[in-house]
Image (cartoon, rainbow, N blue to C red):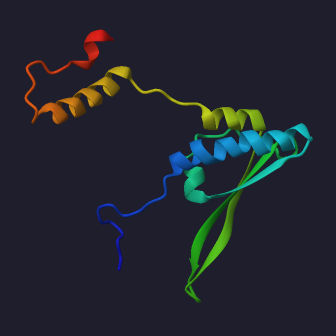
Amino acid sequence: MDWRGKANFPHPDYLSSSRKRLAPQLIFKGGILRSWGKKTAVALNKSFFATLPTLAEVDKKDADIAWMIYDLNVEVGSKRYVLQLHKIVYTKFDAALEQITKSEPGDMNDFVQVLQEKLDEKLENVNPPDAPILDEDL
């Protein structure tokens, strides 16, 4: 059964993975290795790495982290999957961690508008006398 392109087709949640898994491990494990004067290697899927913010690259000799980016490709002759190194990106620890954990806030008015639309949609069938307006108190 091929579900590709269908509604609710499962896909990786890379944003959740970077914020909930990668960043805490870098902080905890990377922090320990850094305090020991050791460097860190992180192996990632190419698609996952592409979702991360742009990391400032440095020379290999100056790096604290080596990001080893891999891709899973089909080998034409055997039709088998092969894990292939795509590239290695070298960064400083603090700069990479700051970039990964930094949140980029959107426009507050856009956010409130989306919330208001959702609230209006929920209250549409309730028929209240006075529907609340979110931005009145902002």
Report x, y in % for residue 126. 10, 32
Q: Is residue 126 left or right of residue 134?
A: left
Please state, as top left, top right, bottom left or bottom right, where the N terminus lies in the image.
bottom left
Q: Residue furthest right?
A: 36
User: In this picture, is 123 found above or below 77?
Assistant: above
Q: Nearer the viewer, residue 88 or 134?
A: 134
Q: Nearer the viewer, residue 129 or 79?
A: 129
Residue drawn at 15 percent across, 21 percent down: 131
Name the residue located 35 percent from the left edge and 76 percent from the top edge: 2
The residue located at (58%, 73%) in the rendering is: 73
Where does the image place residue 30, in percent across and percent down from the top left?
Answer: 78, 43
Looking at this view, is 3 or 118 the one in front?
A: 118
Which residue, as the protein is rendered here, is positioned at the far bottom?
78
The spot of residue 36 in percent (x, y) is 92, 41
Q: Is residue 115 left or right of residue 41?
A: left
Decide: is 82 above or below 66: below
Question: Percent from the top left, x then y, of residue 19?
Answer: 58, 42
Q: In this rendering, would 109 be left or right of 55? A: left
Residue at coordinates 29% horizontally, 62% vertically from top-left? 7
**The quarter of the displayed image where residue 20 is located:** top right
